[in-house]
Amino acid sequence: MTTRRLEIPPKLIPIFDGKATIRGAHGGRGSAKTRTFAKMTAVRGYIWAKAGREGIILCGRQFMNSLDDSSMEEIKAAIKSEPWLAKFYDIGEKYIRTKCGRVEYKFAGLDRNIDSVKSKSRILLCWVDEAEPVTEEAWQVLIPTLREEDSELWVTWNPKRKGSATDLRFRNSKDASVKVAEMNWSDNPWFPAILERLRLKDLAERPDTYDYIWGGSYITVLAGAYYAAGITAAKLQRRIGRVPADPLMTIRLFCDIGGTGARSDAFAMWAAQFIGKEIRVLNYYEVVGQPLSAHVIWLREQGYTPDKAQIWLPHDGKTQDRINDVSYESSLEAVGYTVTVIPNQGKGAAKARIEEGRRLFGAMWFDEEKCAPGLDALGWYHEKKDETRNIGLGPEHDWASHGADAFGLMCVAHEEPKAQAKPEKNWRDRLKNITSNSGTAQSA
């Protein structure tokens, strides 16, 4: 038996040791996970070919228009880094295979060619790199194609958002045959100096995305998002943590109205207290397609009963249901709540909300656990761009906009303590000034 010496990051040794059906690693940039997995595919090919096994090593990515988009060059570099592997493999411009011809690499994009994967036979190993965007549908098609008794699936990815199909399937699996590790730059014993300089530059200049790029964290603040700077400052100043409610102060609830049915927009609601100059943001609620009664049940479960809480609605809170002749305003008043409807702010409404949100962000304290989904929305809320003309088109209307709109409603409705009040006496007077100076941004 020939013994070969192979150096890999210590944290990955238990991932490749022993039997498993799935092996994987997730994390940030510079962790050496991709190069290590590429090298280990070649090691497995070497072992199988030496043992007389025949088959293919399938390397997939969600998006692959050509071999230039594949893992081929990474695998070539990994093989060439080990002289004993380089002697064993035949490497051409568009192929990689063992010189004996028993094991060869194939490459596939899962977004367009997932059905063609089903026709591939004798897949000994499938490695999916950059697997974060792989859909659940693709996993459902791919996994059953691994029909050899000892076939394995390897997965490497940089997490982006909670709840991705890849994350849900593999990150916290309790299956003993699934071995997955988190790998970041600090786990790479050969972390190069050039990447260390880039890492420190990002830490100093782009702290809002540093944890995502280098620390393997989910992306919580999109670069260029309207509230990116505010969220980053709140984290650094430790204004995101545990925020208890003051039992003597009113709970203020600010809503963005969705609708009922699976295709409706989300209903979003922030719970906050205005205490002195502080805005204590206590909770966040968002659902899709639920009736008003479901929102009222949640309010009662949280202790936000009519004697302790008041509700603010956008202008469409007055809109009557054509069938039942009721509105959100009338329905909530019917169950005892004091309701204020903020009138239509007209042209410039979106910009007014964003400007007030940015102005007030430094006075806000957020409950980290209860507000997590809402903070995710604020960290993503960004401007839609016309890439051809390089101009902004106002806020992007996507999954984040409903939470952001409810947040903006809270900001335009905020009133400073009377002792500190400006000549504008209340939010109605101040709103007139905001919207009159807000330019021509699109209304939301």
Image (cartoon, grey):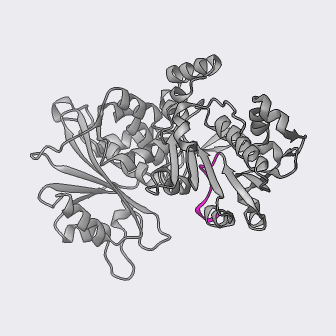
Q: Residue furthest left?
A: 248
Front residue of 106 and 239: 106
Q: Residue drawn at (37%, 31%), measured in percent from left and top?
A: 235
Magenta residue span: 130-138
Q: Residue furthest front?
A: 1
The verdict on residue 309 being magenta is no
Front residue of 425 and 385: 385
Q: Measuring from the top left, give residue 334's x and y in whole percent.
A: 20, 71
Is residue 114 shown above or below 293?
A: above
Q: Residue drawn at (16%, 61%), measured in percent from left and top?
A: 305
Q: Is residue 187 visible?
A: yes
Quadrant of the rendered image containing residue 306 = bottom left
Q: Is residue 223 visible?
A: no
- Tell me if 376 is positioned left or right of 97 in this view: left
Q: Quadrant of the N terminus?
A: top right
Q: Measuring from the top left, give residue 117's x and y in whole percent.
A: 75, 63
Q: How many marks?
A: 0
Quadrant of the rendered image containing residue 243 = top left
- Tell me if 92 is positioned left or right of 69 in this view: right
Q: Residue drawn at (75%, 50%), measured in percent from left and top?
A: 51
Q: Residue furthest right?
A: 93
Front residue of 290 and 36: 36
